[in-house]
Image (cartoon, coloured by chain):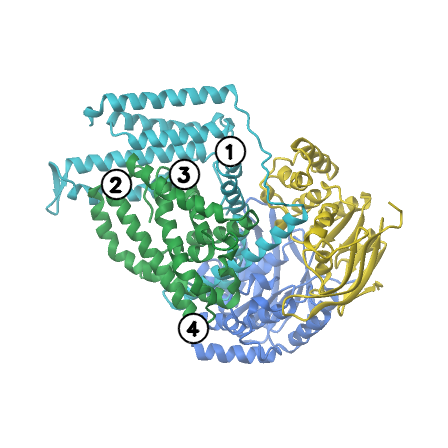
Chain colours: A green, B cyan, C blue, D yellow
Amino acid sequence: MHISDGVAPIPVAVAGALAALPGIAAGLKVLKEERIPAAALVSSVLFLSTLLVRLPLGPSSVHPLLGGLAGLLLGWSAMPAFLISLFLQALLFQFGGITTLGINTFVMGMPAVGVYLLFNGRIRRERDTRKAFCLGAAAGIAAYLASFVLWAGALLLCGRQLAAIVAIAFLPNLVLAAAEGIFTGFIVSFLARVYPAIFGAPAFEAEGEGL
Amino acid sequence: MSCTTFFDGDTFIHRLDPRPRIIVTLAFAAVTAFSSNSGVLCAALAAGLALAVLARIPAAALRRRLLRLNIFTVVLFVTVPPTFPGRTAFALFSIPFSVEGLLWSLSTAMKANAIVLVFAALMGTIDLFTLGHAFHHLKVPVKLTHLFLFTLRYLDVLHHEYVTLLRAMKARSFRPSMRLHTYRSYAWLTGMLLVRSLERSERILEAMKCRGFSGEFHVLKHFRFSAADAAFSAVSFAVLALFLAAELAGAAAVW
Amino acid sequence: MEADEILIRMKDVVFAYDGGRAVLDGASFELRRGERVGLVGHIGTGKTTVLHLIVGLLRPRSGLLEVFGRARSEERDFLDVRLRAGLLFQDPEDQLFCPTVIEDTAFGPLNQGKSREEAAAVSREVLGMLGLGGFEDRITHHLSGGEKRLVSLATVLAMKPDLLLLDEPVTGLDPESAERITAILHTLPQAMLIVSHDESFLRSVTSRSIRVGGGKLHPAVFD
Amino acid sequence: MEADEILIRMKDVVFAYDGGRAVLDGASFELRRGERVGLVGHIGTGKTTVLHLIVGLLRPRSGLLEVFGRARSEERDFLDVRLRAGLLFQDPEDQLFCPTVIEDTAFGPLNQGKSREEAAAVSREVLGMLGLGGFEDRITHHLSGGEKRLVSLATVLAMKPDLLLLDEPVTGLDPESAERITAILHTLPQAMLIVSHDESFLRSVTSRSIRVGGGKLHPAVFD
């Protein structure tokens, strides 16, 4: 769910960057120096997983996006983490683009932060595997759908003529959201069982109340 | 396979200071994205191709990247012209394709390809760690630079862990199929890597503390802005100024 | 199956990692049903490589590889090998990825097409056999090094393999765990190919040894 | 400093990981200036724990810990210990976290308050001493296993420590790299505490060894 170079006219690209900037700044502000290695390693794994895991779906397979998981694990730091991973994707694999880096960071990062604000308190206390799965799945689906809405909105801002793409993408993305939810749910229930402290994004908050 | 490969080489582009290369890439992307003039777009595409050739980017790698990008372009050509208002160029299965829509798709495709070419030629030829250092010298916030450098530093280490675990799964007859078992197995694999990476990050922090870490990061690498860099920057900005002038002057003469 | 059926036949196998020089350069050996063979040699000589070649995690550049009586060269040839040959990795951390012990032991059987109940039953049986009864719901990640090694072995045995490929099964273990594993290996009926640099362990468990060195495989003589 | 100054004194130290049983349970030993002591014991007995206690990465439940002649118990007591005691981690990947070799070796000296020039100079000096001249701008994660271990050692030596704490410095290395590190250790003047399970290596480098087992530290006798 990226917007490529060339599609976004300059005003939209600039608006996207400006929209992403406060979130990125907030994410960096709450990230303490000594937590940088932890944030970096977690985002490395997320990056690798979105790149390498192919979830079989019908005759094809899909890559997970892991926005919801990024939010649960990284909190506000998901914004700079997505900025970096989208930059790497653009540089190494031509997914997304350089002029659209701001928009894409906003599209992927803000839902992650939203999920963090909505679910983090609950996930930290959740020890029941089944409920952890449901919370994870809800977080995964919510972030996925929110990213889809933001993506569609950004695309329509780029030009009305892109509405057909949004229309075509709508149904498949509902299915993809479900796959994303199941995958995220399993990861979250794994973590809740094996290493619940990981949802301390406490790790990535400043002392006291993050923001 | 390494996740942090780049287009290594020893052309004059590789020898340029990374900082002007980054700035020129960004400026080029901005100007190209702004352009709608057919002449400018053709020139931009030509410039991108020329730089890619000068940087000796392997043809196979370049083809792969352009192919990936242009799958999206094909989607544009199929979806945009039928819904774009304007004169009908032709009809396919009685769906009218508008001239304006085709031209818009074409110009978008040209912009995207030109930007990708320049991006690959100027920035794809910088080792990623050097790129991180260059960001530091371009005043990118220190925490962001170090987040970037740490992410890169452990990408291959974690990739190796991923491949090893997946291989062990394969040795136990794991074959992906559309079952919950597959989703669950991949999820556990990812979960395991997350747990281990967090534990590793704690050991890294311990190692940092043992060497007296007190919250400050240092960057030791420095670059020299040479005469060649000045020449490259001057020529690049002159060309971009020309693009802008042509765009502003000939805005009416689109296609 | 015949008693002296040849389970593994390697002939003039050449293998090199990408861009590196040949690790194996004309390696040949055979392993028959019921045999227990040690694989010795210095670090980096290709002992682990031999095990990975047998189950097709690596592919030879040239040479013949027959496993379970059939030549194997492509991925699909090895699918069936992996159902019947159990590979124990050197580092349990490379092998264990499920939340709990029973989920890890059931992973192989589930891949073999067993139902959840069957997979759970065979897991319990193997865990009991290894003295790990009661470990079913333990979080694998929190086990000690020795326990992880035993669980790794259980995940392999749960697939009821005809052939065991063991990579340093007792290295780094405390003597108690090492003895326990040695005793268990003595009771298992499978043919085994065991990589180890612990000669007294190999002498106790295997009937002969092969030395890997200079890209070749030779009968080994212990001092 | 006196010649027989006691660098480390541990007395009746008890340590347990959160919620686990005691790893060390009344452990005592001393290490004097100029001594080179080996630390042996099976996996999971607490060898690494001893090293981590000394630099304060872990804290004892009870008992006395004196390092460099002063009792240490709180985080700020250990800041000074860490600047003077060089801990070599078991996995070089954990220790080499900077992009390039020289940034890694200069990290410690910079934190000690040296200027960039001084830090670069001492880095170059140490790299040269370890035969790593010309490695300054190499990307650390592209190095071979042996080179990574050597660079890890360089990052520790660049801080000019009075005491070296080495965790399995030659494990997993090819014989050549292991010999190179052994030779280097012979030339270093510092007192050392070396965890290893390689007895011949320890015999060559250290003057005596301590065995960790049952939560205690005993003089070790090799067979």
In the image, what residue type sits under mark 2? Cys
Residue C44 placement (x, y as % from top left): 65, 52
Q: Which mark is residue B134?
A: 1
Is residue C16 rendered to the left or right of residue D159?
left
Residue annotated with mark 3: B60
Report which residue position mark 2 lands on.
A158
Q: Residue at x 52, y 23 (%)?
A: B225
Of labels 3 and 1, the one closer to you: 1
Question: Which residue bears the numbered disc 4?
Answer: C113
Q: Are marks 3 and 2 in contact (CB under 8 Å)?
A: no
What amino acid is labelled 3 in the image?
Ala
**Disc 3 packing (10 Å; few <14; some 14–19; many ≥20):** few
**Can residue A83 be seen at all in this image of the molecule?**
no
Q: Nearer the viewer, residue C202 or B78?
A: B78
Asked which quadrant contains residue D19, the reply is bottom right
Q: Are marks 3 and 2 on the same chain?
A: no
Q: Chain of mark 4?
A: C
In this view of the protein, which residue sits in the foreground, C137 or C11?
A: C137
- The image position of residue C19, as x and y in percent, is 55, 44
Name the kind of residue labelled 1 in the image: Ala
Q: Is residue B204 left or right of residue B20?
A: right
Question: SS at mark 4?
Answer: loop
Secondary structure beneath label 1:
helix
Cα distance between the residues tagged 2 and 4 = 50 Å
Quarter where residue C202 is shown: bottom right
Q: Amino acid at mark 4?
A: Gly
When asked about the image quadrant of residue A69, the answer is bottom left
